[in-house]
Amino acid sequence: MLDNAFSQSTLNCAASINIPSNRTVFIPIRFAELKGNHDYLFTPYPNHIYMPKDTYVLQIVAPSNQDGIYVRNVGDKDETIKKGCCIGHISRFRDGAAPHKAVSDTVKSQD
């Protein structure tokens, strides 16, 4: 379990996924068990070093039950992210700030 802002867990791709050229795809992820009801900071590895050429992911704040992440392929050819690919790391804020509503909940409430 992550107990403070300095603890990190590696975030890996949970399945091999093909990403077509010039597309963004939601890929399944896996990481160490996290405490529920907290937000975590996902940070990609510098220069997306472990990911295929021309693919990237942005830094985000994610809930503990996050099951995937968007990956963008900006290249002219399809790329495959292999199962187990190290995408980045996830860490918890030390002060345990109040959890935020999931983006999907916010969008639904505005309808």
Image (tube, grey):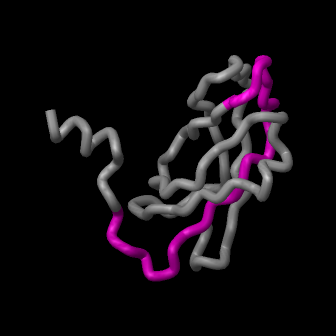
- The residue depicted at 58 percent of the width and 79 percent of the height is 4
The image position of residue 7, as x and y in percent, is: 67, 74
Q: Quadrant of residue 110?
A: top left
Q: Is residue 75 above or below residue 104?
A: above
- The residue depicted at 70 percent of the width and 22 percent of the height is 19
In the rendered view, does 97 fall on the left or right side of 30?
Answer: left
- The residue depicted at 58 percent of the width and 55 percent of the height is 59
In the rendered view, does 89 fall on the left or right side of 84?
Answer: left
Foreground: 72 or 28? Answer: 72
- The residue depicted at 78 percent of the width and 58 percent of the height is 46
Residues in magenta, as a range: 73-99
The image position of residue 105, as x and y in percent, is: 27, 42
Image quarter of the C terminus: top left
Q: Is residue 92 above or below residue 72?
A: below
The image position of residue 73, as x and y in percent, is: 69, 29
Foreground: 100 or 70? Answer: 70
The image position of residue 106, as x and y in percent, is: 25, 45
Q: Is residue 76 above or below residue 67?
A: above
In the rendered view, does 7 fall on the left or right side of 107?
Answer: right
Image quarter of the N terminus: bottom right
Q: How many discs mark residues in the rendered view?
A: 0
Q: Is residue 81 above or below residue 88?
A: above
Q: Residue furthest bottom?
A: 95
